[in-house]
Amino acid sequence: MPLTMLPVGKKAVVNTCRAKGKTKKFLEGLGIIPGTPISVLSEIKGNLIICIKGTRIAIDRGIAQQLTVEFQS
C-alpha cells in the first residue's frame, strides 16, 4: 500500500520506491530504502511527518505516494 495510506502511529516496512532520478537518490540518502522500518508521526494538509531510523522527516504527499509499505509483523 502507499505510505499515504499508513495510519498515524502504525509501523511498517518500506517495500518499494517508485520514484525516479534525483528524487530516488534523495530518498536513499535519507535512508528510505526497501526493508527499512518506517512510521507516520503526523499528517498536516496531506504532507507527512515520518520517523525513519530514529529521525523525523517531513515529506510531501506526492513523494509519499511513490513509496509502498507493508505492515510490520
Image (cartoon, rainbow, N blue to C red):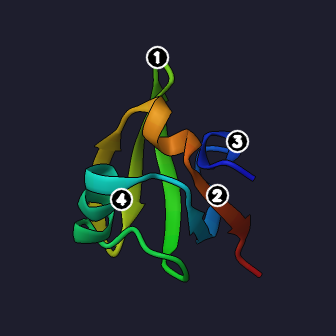
Q: Residue at x 57, y 40 (%)?
A: 65
Q: Position of residue 35 (x, y in %)?
A: 55, 83
Instruction: Mark 2 or mark 4: name the one nearer the start of the chain.
Output: 4
Rendering quarter of residue 4: top right
Q: Secondary structure at mark 1?
A: loop
Quadrant assignment for the C terminus: bottom right
Rendering quarter of residue 58: top left
The circle drawn on residue 45 is 1
Instruction: Mark 1 or mark 4: name the one nearer the start of the chain.
Output: 4
Q: Spot the residue most to the top.
A: 45
Residue type (three-letter) at the residue carrying disc 1: Lys
User: Label 1: how many residues lie within 10 Å, few (<14), some (14-19) or many (20+)?
Assistant: few
User: Label 4: how many residues lie within 10 Å, few (<14), some (14-19) or many (20+)?
Assistant: some
Instruction: Mark 3 or mark 1: name the one nearer the start of the chain.
Output: 3
Real-space Cα distance between discs 1 and 2?
Answer: 20 Å
Residue highlighted by disc 3:
5
Residue highlighted by disc 4:
24
Q: Nearer the viewer, residue 26 or 42?
A: 26
Q: Position of residue 22 (x, y in %)?
A: 25, 53
Q: Is residue 36 above or below residue 32?
A: below
Q: Secondary structure at mark 2?
A: strand
Q: Nearer the viewer, mark 2 or mark 4?
A: 4
Real-space Cα distance between discs 3 and 1?
Answer: 14 Å
CB atoms of marks 4 and 3 within 8 Å: no
Instruction: Mark 3 or mark 2: name the one nearer the start of the chain.
Output: 3
Q: Secondary structure at mark 3?
A: helix
Q: Residue at x 31, y 73 (%)?
A: 31
Residue highlighted by disc 2:
68
Q: Position of residue 8 (x, y in %)?
A: 60, 44
Rendering quarter of residue 16: bottom right
Instruction: Mark 1 or mark 2: name the one nearer the start of the chain.
Output: 1
